[in-house]
Amino acid sequence: MQLTDSPVPAPSPLRAALRGAALALLAGGAVATTAAASDVPRWQLDTSGLLYGELQRTSVVEPMARVTRTFAKGNSFTAQVDFDAITGASPSGAQPSGLVQTTTTPSGNTKTVPAGKLPLTDFRDMRGAVDLEYAQPFGSHLTASVGGHFSKESDYRSLGERGQLSLEAFQRLSTFTLGASANADVVTPLDGTREPFTADDRTGVNANDKHARSWLVGTSRVMTRRWLLGATGTYGEEWGYLTDPYKVVSTIDPLTGHTTGELHEKRPDRRVRRDVLLSSVYHHTEDVSYLSYRYYWDDWGVEAHTADFRLRHDFDASHFVQPHLRFSRQGAADFYCYGLVEGREKPRFATSDYRLGDLNTATVGVTYGFDLVSVPGQLTVRGEYMRQWGRGFPGDAVGSQRTYNLAPAVNTGTLMLGWSVGW
């Protein structure tokens, strides 16, 4: 089961690679000198364990291990393995009602929801993923990389590939990056694929194809010895089965506002995403600050603005602390609704998934890292608190719906422990 289907996706591997190059470029000559002096074969091991928990909802445990082998000529090979164990409950899309409701879980079981409570769907799933990447420098200014991705869970399989070119120019003060990626996924909903806008009808198709491709262009520039600016733009397309097979839309009595039933949602079978990311890295006397702004929009009508700030302070060469602040404001998709009122014309598409609605997200956290004494390597501990809230009392609510918070806040805690060592 997919944990999230956020309209504002997490940064792609291409964007992450660009950011890494920009941060390395910030140090300018110091990094270049170090690289030249250490032009020998070496290994790097990065491991982490992540605990993610939404209050009274979803819990995730995710261990990860990544190994990088850098060869004498500067080329490198990276392999990463992830494993996720997901349990808990997620909003089904159904709305609270003044009456007791009975909902159906993805496995086909029924569940009773008390009056006035938001219906949640229980689930349990495991996911495994493997990522491979090879990077090859051509001369002293051009680097190319290719990679692949495979992940599998009980009802979702993903296979992807990506490539990137990075060119350093103007005395290595500027970096230009081009990238592309493609994914071929298969969605196999538990207990079959439901017919949209029906209570429980099946389509007869168990495996649903989903495809995606994206392109990235970016640049970063060392403005001064302390300041670096970067900009990236991404264009992506998705097509195929884009509906969430486990989300429903409540049917609403036009007079009382009580729910009268549930219909499976329907989303368009094509989506075009665009985003622009502006970033700044500044090296203060003792600290390094990271500031970014991202604007996202797509043809589903979703728009989002995200600001992110981090400040790294090194106490000495062996340990550091880095606080983190992030805020995001997202507008709803064109076909987002709090339910379908009986007697009104049924729309072409409809979803009540809160992740496609009006959504505010605030995150505060801190990372602490230090070198180990008894064993080699560096240990990092990161803790974050995230709060999401939407427009819980919309003006178009009907009857008793007006008395309920239709988009209650979600409180999430994250704890990550990481260990990195090179030799």
Image: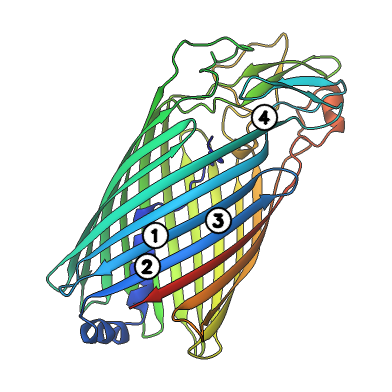
Reading the image, the residue beneath label 1 is: 16
Can residue 222 be seen here? Answer: no
Dot in front, 3 or 2: 2
* Upstream in sequence: badge 3 or badge 2: 2
* Upstream in sequence: badge 1 or badge 4: 1
The amino acid type, in three-letter code, at marker 1 is Ala
Q: Residues within 10 Å of mark 3 (few under 14, many from 20)?
A: some
- The residues tagged by marks 1 and 4 sit, at their Cα atoms, a distance apart of 32 Å
Point out residue 419 in the picture as x, y percentages from the top left corner: 48, 71
CB contact under 8 Å: marks 1 and 4: no
Reading the image, the residue beneath label 3 is: 306
The furthest residue to the left? 139
Residue 92's label in the rendered image is 4
- The residues tagged by marks 3 and 2 sit, at their Cα atoms, a distance apart of 20 Å
CB contact under 8 Å: marks 4 and 2: no
Could you tell me which residue is drawn at 30 percent across and 82 percent down?
A: 31
Dot in front, 4 or 3: 4
CB contact under 8 Å: marks 3 and 2: no
CB contact under 8 Å: marks 4 and 3: no
Could you tell me which residue is drawn at 41 percent across and 34 percent down?
A: 157
Q: Is residue 269 left or right of residue 258?
A: left
Point out residue 176 in the picture as x, y percentages from the top left corner: 26, 63
Q: In this view, does 401 lie to the left or right of 91?
A: right
Reading the image, the residue beneath label 2 is: 20
